[in-house]
Image: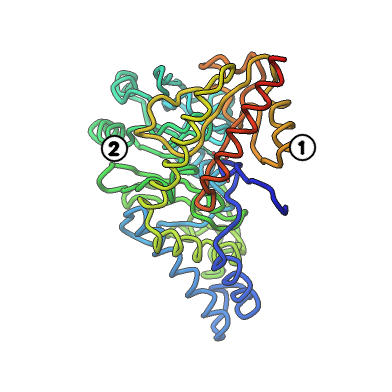
Amino acid sequence: MEGLIYLDNGATSFPKPESVYKYMDYFYRNFGVNPGRSGYDMCMEAGSMVEETRKLLSDFFHGTDPNRLVFTYNSTDALNLAIFGVLRPGDHAITTNVEHNSVLRPLYHLFQDGGIELEHVPFDAKGFVDPDEIARRFKANTRLVAVNHASNVIGTVQPIGEIGRRCREAGILFLIDASQSAGKVPIDMEAQCIDLVAFTGHKSLLGPTGIGGLCVREGVEVRHTRAGGTGVRSAVKTHLDEYPYRLEYGTMNSMGVAGLNAGVKWVLEQGVEKIHEQEMHLTRLLRDGLQGIPGVTLYCADDLENHISVMIFNVDGLEAMDTGTMLDVDYGIACRTGLHCAPLVHEQIGTDKIHGAVRFGIGPFNTEAHIHAAIRAVGEITASRRK
Ligand SMILES: Cc1ncc(COP(=O)(O)O)c(C=O)c1O
């Protein structure tokens, strides 16, 4: 770890703020019991922390009922709950080519075995999905539009307010995958007409792995696709309908919730806009540096206006994986290579044929020195190819 330059924040943020490590340790040592299951003080205290975190996150997304913010393992889990809980045989669903497999695969399973119709909307040359392209595909049986807010591959931020407005006018449910955006780009369920927000705790919300959630707008119902213990009303034979129990099953990851509590508080203290501004300053520096190296190809990086701090590139004549290995072994720089669990993005930009690309993901603890080192390293790797 000593000396490592961590540019893999698209996979998970690292390090976390000091307050996250400290609060998780404090919480688990003092209140690491099963929250909401009994009436003794420790249990009540653990339950209060969970409820406070629900409210923090519900407010963060401009939800109107904190009980409709349910905790899940991660965004994959939340997206599965939403997609399988909303769609029925005969429904039509629309998604995009920007999606991660956590949206593509649940939808594909329902297309294959669950009797739904499915369409994928492509993005334009700069990496943006046109809201009108989505609206043009609306049909009488369209129930759900699922869109990745910020791409984990090309970094583009989709116009979710515009898409949400079109969905609301047509009476279609709108689900966003906020895995990469929550903590970097403001999200307002009310103003942007979003029905369901799926998020993960371990990326830009700066919590640990194993915790995420789904925020469900009032009036939107997600069917149970699981059943189990809720800690209350144990004599009822079926899973409870009321939130948050409706979408929470079994003992929760309370230590994860504690870490997320501290992570969100850190983000709020710094300010989402300020974090984003600082990361985009470094992203522009990185883009300009890489663009100046002959033999380096960047993808969808010309317009950084609606963008987050992830960027992909390739070096002429080198497999992405080999570039990644050189960055790691020769320069101590951590990045991510391959298809990034988003195969349709690579298919559309043509990088699927060369086994993907190299991704740098910038986080709040990166510095200009890290970016200069990365540009220098890519420059040297590229120059060595030309010799
Ligand atoms: C856009 C996007 N969606 C979904 C996910 C899945 O997140 P998790 O693995 O935390 O469920 C990721 C993670 O890389 C992502 O980048």
Question: Along the polypeptide, which appears first: circle 2 or circle 1?
Answer: 2
User: Residue 5's spot in the image, x, y percent?
Assistant: 64, 46
- Residue drawn at the location 64% of the way across and 13% of the way down: 353
Count of marks overlaid on the render = 2
Looking at the rendered structure, the kind of residue marked 2 is Gly
Residue 103 can be seen, yes or no: yes
Q: Secondary structure at mark 1?
A: helix
CA gap, disc 2 and disc 1: 43 Å
Task: Classify the position of the C terminus by image quarter.
Answer: top right
User: Residue 223's spot in the image, x, y percent?
Assistant: 47, 46
Pointer 2 local density, CA inside 10 Å: few below 14, some 14–19, many at least 20 = some
Q: Is residue 125 above or below residue 360?
A: above
Can you tell which quarter of the image residue 269 is in? Answer: bottom left
Looking at the rendered structure, the kind of residue marked 1 is Val
Q: Label for residue 329? A: 1
User: Residue 119's spot in the image, x, y percent?
Assistant: 44, 20
Q: Which residue is mark 2?
A: 161
Q: Label for residue 48? A: none
Pointer 1 local density, CA inside 10 Å: few below 14, some 14–19, many at least 20 = few
User: Residue 339's spot in the image, x, y percent?
Assistant: 62, 27
- Between residue 170 and residue 32, name the one nearer to us: 32
